[in-house]
Image (cartoon, coloured by chain):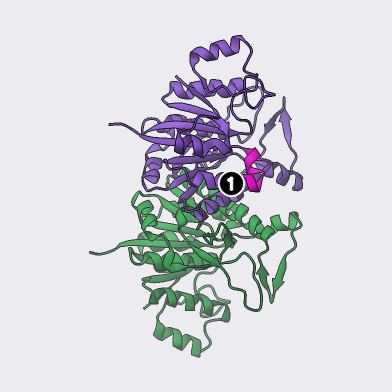
Chain colours: A purple, B green
Amino acid sequence: MQKQELYIIKIGGNVIDHPEKLGAFLKDFSEIQKPKILVHGGGKLATKLAEKLEIPQEFFEGRRITNEETRDVAVMVYAGLINKNIVAALQKNGLDSIGFSGADANLIPAHKRPVKTIDFGWVGDVETEKINANFLEKVISEDICPVFCAITHDGKGNLLNTNADTIASSLAVALSAHFEVNLAYCFEKNGVLENVENENSVIAKITPETYIQLKEKNIVNDGMIPKIDNAFAAIEKGVKSVFILKETFLKKLINENNRTSGTEITQ
Amino acid sequence: MQKQELYIIKIGGNVIDHPEKLGAFLKDFSEIQKPKILVHGGGKLATKLAEKLEIPQEFFEGRRITNEETRDVAVMVYAGLINKNIVAALQKNGLDSIGFSGADANLIPAHKRPVKTIDFGWVGDVETEKINANFLEKVISEDICPVFCAITHDGKGNLLNTNADTIASSLAVALSAHFEVNLAYCFEKNGVLENVENENSVIAKITPETYIQLKEKNIVNDGMIPKIDNAFAAIEKGVKSVFILKETFLKKLINENNRTSGTEITQ
């Protein structure tokens, strides 16, 4: 039997931080005519709140260390303010939805990142094989759209701050057994660009073969390499395609199969 | 066909504010052997956070006016920090649960309190007849415990701060068509007391008849009267019993039908 299509869509902080952009995106998102899951990042709200509360921010080689107070702020902002406002907006648009953290229904088990040279604090690494795909399938079959914030838990009573891109790709992999999953990362550019300065130089499709060439010719810039590597890792684990595109093109891509913008990463 | 029993349990701010009391309560709660829903109040965390953020607090005749910033703090603390930490703790205890606001799955529609002499701001009055009891029944049938914070929505994209006691009684009434519902309000005293000074003077049972006598004799103190009136209102709309008791007696009451403490309000 052919599996049903499912879109897992990650929306980043740049949209979250702009109420008008976010409103327009959520309207488009509500009009997507396929089963879908939304994963949202955090934007700058949590950092601003931590600053106002004078919570000391620690970094190691540019990476944030999530102390307890910073984690609590993340939970308040991501799982509370942003997640529930997105759900309320989707309901207004007529799209039934539920906001989830990874703790709810034990959807996304994780563990605190192991301490090697440095303790990054309350940061979670997802245990993809333990994702509760059965329950998510039931929710989707009720025509309810799951909306995930990037908070997971360790099963020992601790909430964990987690990378939203990782949440999206882990959900995509875990749900591939149940659905034909497409993963879409919405970001501020039109897609993966041949020339970062030129928004019209979108590479329409990247396959393992063309990716080797693109890297050899130094066409793909360094910042994109981990994203594309992660995309191929998801595809190897059963995800059908990964799209990288501007959020304003998402609805057209999915409803009309309009490929005039965005990059598709596929086998 | 006999309806399945369901307990809706409201836990108040006094327990929320004490991590040790809350941990002990959640352990007991996890061991209740009946289908159940938890509704939690907010405690003092939201007020403390609003103070730290120097959000001006307005009152009218002692009642808070919920301006936009205060509402956002309530959403962060109730729907985010408290709700998700409770869910994580219940998962640790082996009780599968999902944290909900009223916006999720459109579970608790509400409307902004109408402005009469005063605008109380982003405060919601529950529309009990629109509660999504069907979806809650499905969640409960999956052996998942719903955990509600006292945030609802108006269907127009606005989140609303709502009274947690009202959430509990509205859920109880709405679910009475599907379950035999018992509603339990946990608070800091042993029950409704004949003598407020004496914790051993618990009135074991109040019926409409005995309530008239208690009021005539001025035995029930003024603070309890609205609670008891609300209890009878819920019973008139189909709820089986309303219990008012200390949270430490809850597990014995439900698992062992131990009535040595607490007050039962019933027909």
User: Which residue is at a point 62% across and 48% down the rendered structure image?
Assistant: A76
The x and y percentages for residue A72 are 63, 45
User: Which residue is at a point 52% across and 84% down the rendered structure image?
Assistant: B219
Q: Which residue is mark 1?
A: A24
User: Which residue is at a point 50% across and 73% down the rendered structure image?
Assistant: B200
Q: Is residue A45 left or right of residue B35?
A: right
Query: From where the camera sits, is residue B62 visible?
Result: yes
- The rendered magenta stretch, by its main secondary structure, is classed as helix
User: Which residue is at a point 58% across and 70% down the rendered structure image?
Assistant: B113
Quarter of the picture containing the N terminus of chain B is bottom left
Q: Which residue is most to the bottom? A: B216
Chain letter belonging to callout 1: A
Q: Is residue B119 left or right of residue B166?
A: right
Amino acid type, callout 1: Ala
Q: Tell me: residue A177, above or below residue B133.
A: above
Query: From where the camera sits, is residue A100 visible?
Result: no
The x and y percentages for residue B237 are 38, 74
Magenta-drawn segment: A13-23
Picture quarter containing residue A160?
A: top right
Residue closest to the eye, B21 or A57: A57
